[in-house]
Amino acid sequence: MSFKFLELPNFAEEEGDLLTDTDKWMYEVAKLRKEELMAYESSLKAKWDTQNAFNSVRREAEEKAGFQFVKNLLFNTDFDDEKIAELASVSLSFVQKVKAELKVK
């Protein structure tokens, strides 16, 4: 796999040479004044922070739901840990973690 790096200040394409959306984006960003670039970078950081917060909440909710489902299977079935992991679409270690937290035999 080969990687290419581009320093935006060194982006030297002319407006008529822009072929892709990426070229057009790099051209626009390379032409920003310092204050505009700082505002742009700040808005990107805010967007990424918000996305990371949403992803964290989503992961937490999914884990809680998985925990509850595994708990119900542990208490209400005679399935072994492997079968519970399969039914709940979680790892065996997650089932064992839930089991340990609930102190289920």
Image (spheres, rainbow, N blue to C red):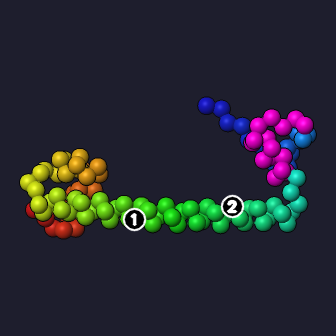
Which residue in the structure is indicated by mark 1? 60
Earlier along the polypeptide chain: callout 2 or callout 1?
Answer: 2
Rendering quarter of residue 13: top right
SS class of the residue under badge 2?
helix
Quadrant housing the N terminus: top right
Magenta region includes residue 63: no
Is residue 32 among what the camera can see?
A: yes
Image check: 30 left or right of 81? right
Return the residue nearer the eye: 24 or 42.
24
Is residue 7 among what the camera can see?
A: no
Q: CA distance from mark 2 to mark 1?
A: 24 Å
Which residue in the structure is indicated by mark 2? 44
Residue 105 spot, x, y in % from top left: 10, 62
Per the rendered image, the range of residues in magenta is 16-30
Residue 89 spot, x, y in % from top left: 29, 49
Point out which mark residue 6 bears: none
Return the residue nearer the eye: 62 or 12.
62
Tell me which residue sits at (29%, 59%) in the image.
Answer: 66
Examine the residues drawn in magenta and state their main secondary structure. helix
Tell me which residue sits at (61%, 61%) in the image.
Answer: 48
